[in-house]
Amino acid sequence: MKRVRLRKYRESDFEALHETLSDEATKKYFPWMYTSYKEQSMLRLKMRLMSQEFGENAPCAIEDFWTREYVGEVDGHLAKDDPKTLELLIIIHPKARGKNYAKAATMEYMKRVLKTNPDIEKFRLEIAESNTSSKSVAQKLDFEFSRYKDEKSREKMEYWEKDADLIK
């Protein structure tokens, strides 16, 4: 059964995006995305809308397939250490966490990427060592712990990877 739909951002996503970006879990696990200022959230929404307009790779809004409500964001970029690896970023609205949106959106996004970029050989998740929820999602999607990230950061970061050949 279909759980999510990936789509472009809309101006009407502003309040839900701000709630997501100003959440304490965002502050802890995605500090570069965190903001408590509505003005910054509006600027980030406008940047997402502009990048979509010009056809650049842009984050996708995640919405519940049935209610059409915004439940998060999924995005990807090529890894610095391997141009055939796509690093994924998934952030779920606080009220939507624990409801399998991250798992469904990640799978949907990987399938979409492989249709437009068949050169991708691997997908990677970078997960804080203490983020048990994200590690659980990675395991449910058959990602395997690869190694610890080499960079020094406030918390030890782990790489979880999955071969693109395993995406069905």
Image: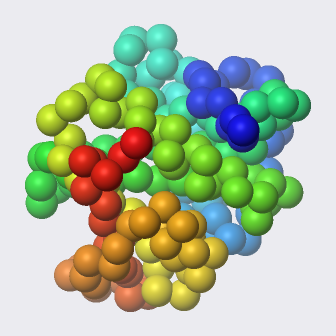
Q: Is residue 103 above or below residue 120?
A: below
| Residue 164 appears left or right of 74 | left
Look at the image and tell me whether residue 136 can be seen.
Answer: yes
Between 38 and 95, the one lying in front of the other is 95
Residue at the image position 54 percent from the left and 67 percent from the top: 140
Look at the image and tell me whether residue 32 can be seen.
Answer: no
Look at the image and tell me in which quarter the C terminus lies.
top left
* Count of picture labels: 0
| Residue 72 appears left or right of 116 | right
Q: Is residue 61 above or below residue 32?
A: above
Question: Residue 62 appears in which quarter of the rendering?
Answer: top right
- Relative image position of residue 107 (x, y in whole percent): 50, 46
Q: Is residue 154 above or below residue 82?
A: below
Residue at the image position 44 percent from the left and 22 percent from the top: 51
Residue at the image position 46 percent from the left and 86 percent from the top: 129
- Relative image position of residue 88 (x, y in whole percent): 40, 52
- Relative image position of residue 136 (x, y in whole percent): 57, 75
| Residue 92 appears left or right of 66 | left
- Relative image position of residue 139 (x, y in whole percent): 49, 72
Q: Is residue 127 above or below residue 66?
A: below
Between 47 and 131, the one lying in front of the other is 131
Question: Residue 119 appears in which quarter of the rendering?
Answer: top left
